[in-house]
Image (spheres, rainbow, N blue to C red):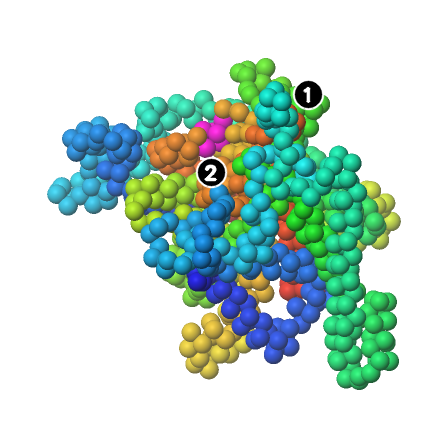
Amino acid sequence: MPVLLLTDAFVFLLLGLLLAYGLHAARHEHLRAPWRRVVASRVGLVSLVVLGCYAAIGLLDTIHFHPRLEPEPRPEAGSATAPVAGAGQSAPAHYAPEVLSLLDLWLAPLRERQEMTYSAPFATHLQAMETQTLADGTSQRVYPRLRHGGVHLANPDVDRGGDIAATLLLGMGKGLILWGLLVMLLGAAALTWRRGTWGFRAWWLGLRELARGRTRIPWRVGLLTLGLMLVLGWGLADLAVKYHVLGTDKVGEDVLYQALKSIRTGLVIGTLTTLVMLPAALLLGIMAGYFRGLADDVIQYLYTTLNSIPGVLLIAAAVLMLQVHMANHEAEYTSLAQRADLRLFFLCLILGVTSWTGLCRLLRGEALRLREADYVQAAQALGVGHLAILGRHILPNVMHLVIITLTLDFSGLVLAEAVLSYINIGVDPTMNSWGNMINGARLELAREPIVWWSLAGALVFMFVLVLFANLMADVVRDAFDPRCRD
Amino acid sequence: MTAYLLRRVLYALPILLGVNLITFVLFFVVNSPDDMARMQLGAKRVTPEAIATWKAERGYDLPLLFNAQAEGLERLTRTIFFDKSLRLFLLDFGTSDAGRDIGHDIGQRMWPSLAVAVPVLLVGLLVNISLALFIVLFRGTYIDLAGVVLLVAMLSISSLFYIIGGQFLLGKLLRLAPISGYAQGLEAWKFLILPVIVGVMGGIGSGARFYRTLFLEEAGKDYVRTARAKGLGERLVLFRHILGNALIPILTGVVVVLPLLFMGSLLTESFFGIPGLGSYTLDAINNQDFAIVRAMVFLGSVLYILGLVLTDISYTLVDPRVRLS
């Protein structure tokens, strides 16, 4: 039974808007040109591929549902951190109360294989000692075997290295084969199709062109990146089924699973924030610049006021309010998943309030400049209404600023989430996010031996996303900013 | 100049009023004074009388924004908003919900904040400018490319990593500096090493990259071409012409943040256990002490506006073409 959480709805709305924009832009050459410049740059294409992989995982994690229960009740009935919906939801009897996503379904082997407590990456034994009673009645302190990680090994000390290497190579091989097929069939076919001739020879020529990197859009680099992701991903996936690739955390949950689940949180913060702030920033910004006078004064006052409040404090105050409100009205928020989701949405909202001012000021400046442009003056002289001028002449000419700002803001927001979650004013503590992972892991550095994997996992996943978002933002800025063009 | 400053101060008043109103409304939209009393007193065994006394003691027994029962101007002044928020304009911060004098706390905790923030700013400025200059000196070569890649990578690393990594590497493994803590007076320098290094490292990515674009922008201008055409060496052009002119936007950019140094850094201070205003605010957030949060929001806004005014003034000082009117 499908479930639509609040942020899910907004993600789908965003997706719809993107699709509409894409279709619209594809039919207009002047809108298509900058995007073609983005794709034509190597860095841009590579970033697109990597960000696409993240987005795919995030989207899989956005389609939520109540799983159908088997006739006999399953013994494990939901892991500790999977968002569990309370009894308040009127679910039919044969649906489980927990909310799962497609990603959970796909990662079921990771999600359901809980250990007792910490275990290192690729470990076969727990990190903590346990007292075991031997057959002859004496007890002994040992590191017990993991329940799931590497259980197929009879003699872990000897076999483990070889098994890891073999699994990794096999997985990577599978990925390589899939990638090869993809390139040979799809890639080359697309190229020959574009040229309009068919047959083996044309296909061979297309493949050669691809291999030599002589295409106008650097497909070779893009495909290589995709290949790298596929090969590494498949190798990792095969390993993850047998071992805990990034170890387990305090309650024994797989860290790789947590890191993958956190992708959605990061992406939602980075994108929804801009979505909620966009209408206000656009409308107020161009109105202030276009109408000037009183409207300008009021809008300027508004954003100067908001801007002069230190951002972190405003967020802190707002989240504090929400917490108090939730504590006082506990009855209204029955399910944990709903509660966590609402808090995520609220965080997006409040981050949007603190970050729209920059875009608004930028748009105001641009609108001020545009209203003096000849075509706007001409439209005014011809008696075109204000609304029509704003919609037809001003708005399309500030869109490049909007796109540049949105991509520039994205990486900052993802990083901000981690910091905010660390100081407890970010997403709900029960929600998977990189900030929460770091927060939970930082005290464990003092342990002996050190528990570093949670921290490392979160930081690496976040670093890759932010790095490519930053690179993408640079390419987008260069492609869209008319000043950067030759 | 005087007229300009006076006007800026008058402009600031409605903005600060707006700031107060926003924080006030934000708080009382979801909380009634009754809720606050219940929370402070504990959910159990709360009688209506206890709530009434609590509210009367702290002055929360008045209407929020508009007192319909009072006469004349008192309709506006005999309210919680006037009582609690407008006093801030006289820099009277009142007492926190836990009963401490906020003004006194701020005065004491300001100094540790400054002791961290000022070295971070100065050292960071020096490092970032030198690094950016170095990269610009080798522009168009592989050093340039590698430098930019490095800066983007550094920019993409979460600030949490710098803090945790710095504490782990310098504090725990190499034992060069104490991991956290603070001492009064000159003894404090030991505890400042680590936060300052971490703060500078965390700022290099964005700072040096920004300065590099400033330098490059300046390097494309006509006077630089003229200087080269006269046969001046690359180094002379870079240091005398480009650096000098690019320092104008850099320094005015620094002036904006100068007042905000007082506020300290939330993250650094809490991680390194420095008793500054940042950790003060964070503690208040975690203890849900609204009086302190409100005072800090107000202080932050005042300092922000002060920064804007100082920036305008500094423009006139470094660039004689700019006149304030």
Q: Residues within 10 Å of mark 1 (few under 14, many from 20)?
A: few
Q: In this orientation, which residue lies closer to the viewer: A195 or B129?
A: A195
The residue furthest bottom is: A197
Which chain is mark 1 on? B
Q: Is residue A350 visible?
A: no
Q: Which residue is mark 2?
A: A424
Q: Are marks 1 and 2 in contact (CB under 8 Å)?
A: no
How far across and down, in percent of the image, does residue B73 sit?
Answer: 18, 42
Which secondary structure lies at badge 1?
Answer: loop
How far across and down, in percent of the image, does residue A319 sit?
Answer: 41, 43
Residue beneath the point at 64% across and 47% down? A461
Residue B113 versus residue B70 in the image, above or below? above
Residue beneath the point at 27% across and 33% down? B43
The answer to which image quadrant residue A144 occupies is: top right
Residue beneath the point at 74% across and 59% down? A175
Residue B207 versus residue A179 in the image, above or below? above
Left or right: residue B222 compared with residue A381: right
Left or right: residue A331 compared with residue A274: left
Left or right: residue B79 compared with residue A206: left
Q: Which mark is residue B175?
A: 1
The residue furthest front is: A136
The residues colored magenta run: B276-282
Q: Residues within 10 Å of mark 2 (few under 14, many from 20)?
A: many
Whether B277 is among the magenta residues is yes
